[in-house]
Image (cartoon, coloured by chain):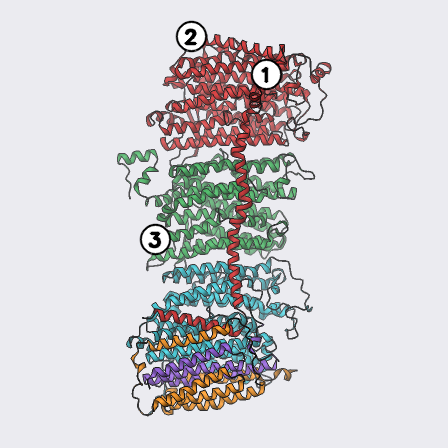
Amino acid sequence: MEEVLFFIAAIGALGGAIGVIAMRNPFYSVLALIVHLFSLAALFLLLTSAFVAAAQVVVYAGAVMVLYVFVVAYVGGGGESAWEPIPGQRFLAPLLGIALFIELAVAVLSSSLLALGEDGPHVQAGFGDPAAIGRLLLEKFLLPFEASSILLLLAAVGAIVLASNRRQENA
Amino acid sequence: MSATAWAWLVLLFPLLGSIVIGVGFHALPQKVAGIIGTVSIALAFACGIGALLSLLGEDPEARHHASSLWDYASVAGLDIKLGIFVDPLSVFMVLIVTGVSTLIHLYSYGYMQSDEGYHRFFSYLNFFVFSMLLLVLAGNFVLLTVGWAFVGFASYALISFWYRRETATRAGMKAFVINVVGDIGLVLAAFLIFRELGSFDYGTVFEKAPEVFTTNEWTITAICLLLLVGAFAKSAQLPLHTWLPDAMEGPTPVSSLIHAATMVTAGVYLIARTHVLFELAPTAADIAAFVGLATLLVAATMALVMTDLKRAIAYSTMSQIGYMIMGVSIGAYSAGMFHLMTHAFFKALLFMAAGSIIAAMANDQNIDRMSGFGKAMRFTSITFVCGALALAAFPGTSGFFSKDEILAFAEARGGMYLIFTVLGYVGALMTAIYSFRLVFRVLPGRPCKEAQELIDTGHVAHEAPKNPATGEPEDTDVGFPGPEHHIAEQSLPMRVAMGVLAVLALVGGLIQIPGVDDVVTKFLDPVWEGSPLAAIEPTLGEDYTGLGIGGVIALLGIGIAYVLYVRRPELPRRLEQRLRPLHTLFANKWYFDEAIDFLVVRPALAIGRFANRTFERFVVDGLVNGTAETVRGAGGVVRAVQSGFVRSYALLLIAGFAGLALYFLLSSS
Amino acid sequence: MSSAILWAPLAFGLLGLFLPQKAVGWWAVLGTAVTLGLAIVAAVGFDTGSSAMQYAVDEPWISGLGVDYSLGIDGLNLFLILLTAVLWVGGVAFAAFREQERAKSFFFLMLVAETATLGAFLAQDLLLFVLFFDLMLVPFYFLFGAWGHDRSGEGGITASAATLKMIVYTLIGSLLMLVAAIATAVLAADGGHLTFSLAALNEHGLGEGSQRWIFWFFAAAFLVKMPAFMLHGWMPDAYRAAPLPALIVFSGVLAKVGAYGFLRVVLPLFPDATVEFQEVILMIALASILYGSVMAFTQTNVRLIAGYSSVAQLGFITAGIFALQADGSDGAVLQMVNHGLVVAPLFVVVALLLERTGTEDISEMGGLALRAPVLAALFLIVVLATLAMPGSANFIGEFYILNGLFEAKIVFAFVAISGVAMSAYYALRLYQQTMHNRKPEGLLSREIGLRDGLILVPLVLCIVGLALYPQVVLERTAPSVAQTVAKVRQNEPPESRLASMSLEEKAEVESGALKIVP
Amino acid sequence: MSIDWFIVLSALLFATGALGILLRRSPMVILLCLELMLNAGNLALVAFSRMVGNGQGQVFAVIVMVIAACEVVVGLGLIVAIFRRRIPLNVDDLRELRG
Amino acid sequence: MNFNEPHLDYAGISPLIALTVGICVVLLSAVFKPTKRWAPGLTTIALAATAGLLIWQWDDPKTLITGALRLDDLAISISLISILTAGFCVVLSLRERATEEAGSGEYHSLLLGSVLGMVLLAQATNLVSFFVALETLSIPLYILCATNLRREGSLESGLKYLIVGSIGSATLLYGMAFLYGGTGATNFAGIADGIARNGLDGDPLILIGIAMAAVGLAFKTSIAPFHQWTPDVYQGAPTPITAFMAVATKAAAFAVFLRFFDVALGSQLDDWQPALAALAAISIVVGNVGALGQDSLKRMLGYSGVAQAGYMLGGVVVLSESGTSSLVFYLAAYAFMNLAAFAVIVGRERETIFGDDIRAVRGLGTERPLLAWPLTISMLALAGLPATAGFIGKLYLIEALVEGDYTWLAVFIAIGTMISLAYYLRVVAAMWMRPETEVASGARPVIAGASPEADPVDPDAGSRWYIVGPALLAAAVTVFFGIIPQPLVEFASHAGAALFG
């Protein structure tokens, strides 16, 4: 059962990813990414990480993707021309992609770490649920937590700086 | 006063004279400069006499002294002092040098009177005398080299005295460079001596040499050969002689003093001085003797055909020095030195007379154009004849005794050395012929235009001076005054100088007549103490046979010259045509200049050109520029990769990662 | 004392920045004169017979890195310091007599250069030496580049390009030297206390393997600086670009730092490598002698004649050092001083010729002696010293060098000496073509002025003085040199040492009085 | 399901994201691809977290999400700014800076 | 399930608090009209306070917030360098076009945010805080680069930086995931333990993790071949930001580079050392040859930064106390040398029409000696000539390299330096050795800078105190530490001792 779910989710994630890079129209790419994200959330659930899965759906598929959709709608999603101005890019990029995958896969599969080949240890109930994660966030990872909040603030400021129409305002 | 003190004074006066005249060239009136120059040399001569007397007052065995002023450069085991060595040989040389120099200064006093560079001339001349005396008195091989080089430089300065004349400057350069080659020989010899004997000092070296070296060992042979390089360069022996004829570009007193009487005999002195070494290396000594012989013959042939008056005399100088070198190399030390002395007298005289004549010819030196000066310039002619007689070894003159003594010694030594006697006489015959060739071509006959003018008006109305070699007008800013002051008849100092020398040339030989007296030999004998060669003495019979043969040959030579140049003046031309190749060879100076040009000068210039045009540009600069270009090319590559496409940056980043990851995977265990 | 000598020029230079443009030249002259005075005082108080470091200063500077501020004077550098002080007075005075653009910067840089150069000579800490060695270039970079001559119109390159070439070229060696110097200290410390002090490094010694590459790094720096054959590519352009006052000191002193470096650093610190590579360096030296000479007699630009002749002369000096004999090195030190003393006035004369004729090409000059006999005479003395006329101190220098070489490697000596003959030709040619021969139309000939005389005459007097009494240098140099050379020789195999011994020494060895310590 | 499946999948996603960046010219799509890469990292983190049995990886993943969101926000802001300047939204046209 | 409140050492985190408060205050000041002009002042105060608080913690190492951070002398010294650079940046940003475009408050708060990221990064001892800090450093910089909104180049640089930077971050993250997976720990020490415990020495999983982490860090420190953003972004960004970025980013990234590779990955030294050394060598070559012939000074400095990063990476490669100290020393020296140059560029860019083109400094020697001298000193120092801090820095680095048996890398540094002379001295030559430019200020020929979005020319910009002051100060310090380096050496040796002592 788990295997089936995994493969379904995996195909969804991978299909979504391929969709992102294959779609001509950015709008469809965004949609493909949403598929990808939901599939990922499913995978997270398979890994008994309920909180992460939830956050994935809420934060990403919810908030971030909405932002994307808006921006795509704002700037318009024109297709790209098929002409490749960089010599060799078309040829080298897939090559490198494959190489990257093989290297990473080899690293994982040839590792002497036995746990990799297993399903993972038995975990207590509550592993990965909001309470556990929340505790970790406020105890051990308090600093990253706080820092990321400041980062969010800064990013918001940045977005305003970049996207606000100050120029016309000043003029 | 001790002999060494006198010797220091001998050195001091010419140096002072040179400096005073040189520094005070603006302030001193011309006459004063001339007087200072002459007097300082005369004082040196007087001090030389002082040294002589001082030496004579001592035991013959103790007649050698060393003295030094200060440590010149003595560290690291090299002990070089500013030291002199006084013994009969050096005093003998001092006397000749200062004596003849005094007369020549006197001559120059008149001769150079209207020259622009009068001060300069006397300063140089005094400096030359100083250098020569330093060479003679030096107490070690380093100081010897110093004197040796100073002399070379003085010679350079005086040859190119009229420095806007390019033939003169070129000749000066030639002389200097060849002299430097000689210096190098000396320096290398000094190194070898130091390496083997651990000292540069004459005293130590001569004392130790017989203990350290075995006869004909390669080192001592090498030392002697290197010394010979020095000697040959300075004494114009084959093949390093080519500078001497060119040196005639200098003013005539210079030719007279330096290139006849003193400097060129330095090689003879050197061999005599280092005879201890040469006796240990008989091979080297023989080589020297053969070179001397060759030079004497070759130079004589050239002198036979030269049409340039001064150059002809110059070749005769070479030839005579060949005798001396031959003499001192085979062991006839005293005889060699004696010939050196007499040669100084008559050769200086000949040049002086020639200078007078050339002046009358408005610097034209071609004997083909001269004739009839016997009537025009009586005093000059008489002295010229005196000189020529001595040179031709006319019986009774100084050259007669000195030359024959060398040949007699060779005969007495016997064996192989008989060759020297025989060929020496051949040379003597040629000597007589060429010396009287000059006399007969110049003095008798119908006066040429200039001579006639002299007879008519007492002076020559000369045109603007021209360089006889190139024909271009001279730059009179630096000299070349009118001839009237050059003519011996018209200047008392010149006449005095020539007169004294004429007398000496005629009678100078009388101090050493076999069986009658032997002043020179007796005085010099302590120097060759312990030398087996010096002990060889021709018997009286041999001596007189030699003298007899010599006299006959001299007369024969003069006779031939008379026939050729007076009785049948058309004969030389016919001979010339008959012996065309030989004449061409002689007239072209045996092609020595050409050979040197071909073997040394041209390759050097070709290498220089190659270095300059090719090597420097393509290799040295090419290396730099090539590196720079490579680096710049690499920069171009980097800039090309930096294409501005962000996706290409991403590509490189990922490629870099892939590479790095690959490395790590490969290195993982 | 050492510190005073070192910093005096810089102090004057800095103060000079606050003076009006007009006065700054004379102020700089004063500064160099004071430095000279201090150097003379040091020389007078110098203990002649000793090889020990005198007037030593030793303070920690960067203690974390083991670098000390360590100065001192001994026989090796005493006269080089004097030479530096003398030539800088000459060069600066020469410039002060003439109008200079941006005078303040010019003289400031000149004085900085003096401090840097003195520093290189005085430093007794390896790193301090490297530092000053590199620092020397900086002021000259500006002097050459900003006040230099643009030769792009006559087939050459611009001053800034020439000076860039020079600095890149010379720094190639210097930077490698920096690495090598650090490696020396680190390897010598071997985990212990790190120090760059030459005295301490002297005692430690390095393994043969590391000596080898370190030796070449140092050699590269020094050979480029000299410059040696094949590494002289920067020289022609830089010499042609350089402003003459700067060139006077540059040619006179800077090349010597390279040679000095061999004596001060390479021989004592890397004795095994020195012995091992002796012949290679000698080959380079010989090539420099021959090539420099050949080039010198084909050039017609006076600067290049002097430049290439320096290549040859420095070849002699290197050969002397690498004879690895006491006399060779003694001669080398003497010759460094001599060469500085001749090449500087040579460039003064070049400057005067340029002012008179407007050209630097000897084929366009000639016949100047007539109206300028004093100048000609002074020039002649310089030229004769250049060609190592016997009787000059240069002769003694070369004599010692060649004698050393003769004892060590006789074949090299024979080849090297041919350079002497060539030097006679090119030096005399330089004199003849300018002073003698026909005077080209329209050429002005003028006697040397009083002010230039004040520069040239003392320099010539130095030449003459040394010619009369070279012992003054030799006797002070010898103890230090003996120590340096002994350091190298003690690592030689016994038989080769025996071969190069003098007669007395050999006798002593045979009699057992002297033992060869392997 | 053994953990290495998850990891290999994440590697595949990572490579896909990288490939997208290399091939696509719209800055928007490139941003999406960056998301893919970060998500691949997240998947690996969560998988490893499951494997080692502690929640640290999950916390990391959550924080990465926040950061990814920040990047997106800034990226989109830039895209808007560029759009405003009427520069074509094509990264290949942004090459004033090069060489 | 009880909640264990983490212990907070408020003294230790006081610098962070100061910065955070600073960010908020500066942001708030932008809201009200009268306080809008206060932003630079407030920023300076925040920076000064942070610096003061950091110095207060000097020589008192402690671990903060449940092992997320470690405040030791390495962190402090690096933070101080970053803060100093930020301070210079604030001064140079006065009257900068970008601050007006972005709004002074926003601009400065972003700057402070980036500084916060740096301070955090220098202290990070945990993968999560490491990653967060790195992003806190980077994201504000992406924005700041683009703040000169009217210039296409500025936007371009921002986007490029963002894209490539995010790839770097993603790679780093993935690597961290592997390391976490292999060891089950996120704190550095735990990673080291995990490797040992799980017997993962030289395991591909760990090694790939290291490789990916190295790539991420190499990207931040501009190590070739991950450097390509550097010249473009340096050139496109507003010059004060470039100055800040060039020094501070590098400093912070090197700090974590050192800490991460020492504490977490020290046991894998044999595996990563040669790789990093190779990267250093490549950087040296690429950076130096790339800088040749660049006409844009900022771009040239960008390439030179690549090369300098290569030199500095040597300090990481040897992984020793002296390596660390030398790296910190070099960073400090590098800060001053670079700032002097950038100050001059800022001034010239505002007063000439040539922007940051090398033509802008032609004849500077006579025109504005007070700017020419700092730039000259800066160039000489970057080239490593003596009597500047640059020389001592190189000396220190080389010493560390030789001690660490990486002499060949030292030789590479020497060779790189030789090449670098060609472009550094080109600038010097332009200032002193060419005829002066005949700039008629105000005239706008149709060349670079004449496009409508070009910044207006301020003919006196080069003489304003906030240009000349920083330039002179930085140059003076460069020379000072070149002659009396001992204080800085001691400062740096504390940093080394913090990690290895």
Disc 2 crowd rating (10 Å Cα; few below 14, some 14-19, many 20+) is few
Q: Name the secondary structure under disc 3.
A: helix
The residue type indicated by label 3 comes to Gly
The answer to whether residue C259 is left or right of residue C354 is left
Q: Residue C209 — which label? A: 3
- Rendered location of residue D72, percent (x, y): 50, 83
Q: Which chain is purple?
A: D
Name the residue that disc number 1 marks. Answer: B575
Q: Quadrant of residue B661?
A: bottom left
The residue type indicated by label 2 comes to Leu
| Disc with the residue nearer the chain's start (1 vs 2) | 2
* Chain A pictured colour: orange
Residue with the most extreme front position: B578
User: Which quadrant does the C terminus of chain B fall into?
Assistant: bottom left
The residue type indicated by label 1 comes to Leu
Q: Which of C46 and B632 lies nearest the eye of the viewer?
A: B632
- Rendered location of residue A76, percent (x, y): 58, 86
User: Which quadrant does the N terminus of chain B fall into?
Assistant: top left
Q: Name the secondary structure under disc 1.
A: helix
Residue occupying the point 69% across, 65% down: E440
Where B222 falls versus C344 (above or below)? above
* Chain E pictured colour: cyan
